[in-house]
Amino acid sequence: MNLPNGARAIVDIQKLRAYCLNPHHTRGRHKARVFASVGIREADAEELRTALLQAATNGEARLGTLNLYGQR
């Protein structure tokens, strides 16, 4: 199934650079380490953003766990 409203997805480039791909961010450095392990670094933020938006629009989505907070 497609991600509902995937074409309306927003990926903030600054959040990718300053948080997800920043190896010096207090909490984001762990995500940055995982991304770096597959060759994605801060300089690749725009390429990652494009890939995420394409995945949100065209990729297959699977339902995750249902818990007290909702459906993942």
Image (cartoon, helix red, strand yellow):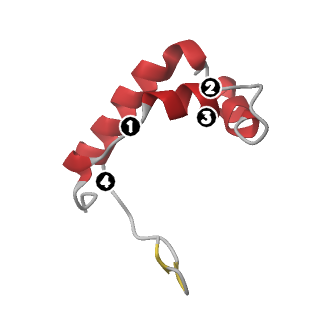
- The reply to whether callout 4 and callout 3 are in contact (CB within 8 Å) is no
Label 1 and label 4: CA atoms lie apart by 12 Å
Q: Residue at x 75, y 38 (%)?
A: 30
Which comes sooner in the sequence, label 2 or label 3? Answer: 3
Label 4 and label 3: CA atoms lie apart by 23 Å
1 vs 4, front mark: 1
Count neighbours of disc 4 (C-alpha within 10 A) and say few if under 14, some if 14 to 19, many if 20 or more.
Answer: few
Q: Position of residue 15 (x, y in %)?
A: 53, 34
Q: Is residue 12 above or below residue 24?
A: below
4 vs 3, front mark: 3
Q: Residue at x 61, y 28 (%)?
A: 18
- Type of the residue with mark 3: Cys
2 vs 1, front mark: 1
Residue that numbered label 2 is attached to:
38
- The reply to whether callout 2 and callout 1 are in contact (CB within 8 Å) is no
Per the rendering, the mark at residue 60 is 4
Which comes sooner in the sequence, label 2 or label 4? Answer: 2
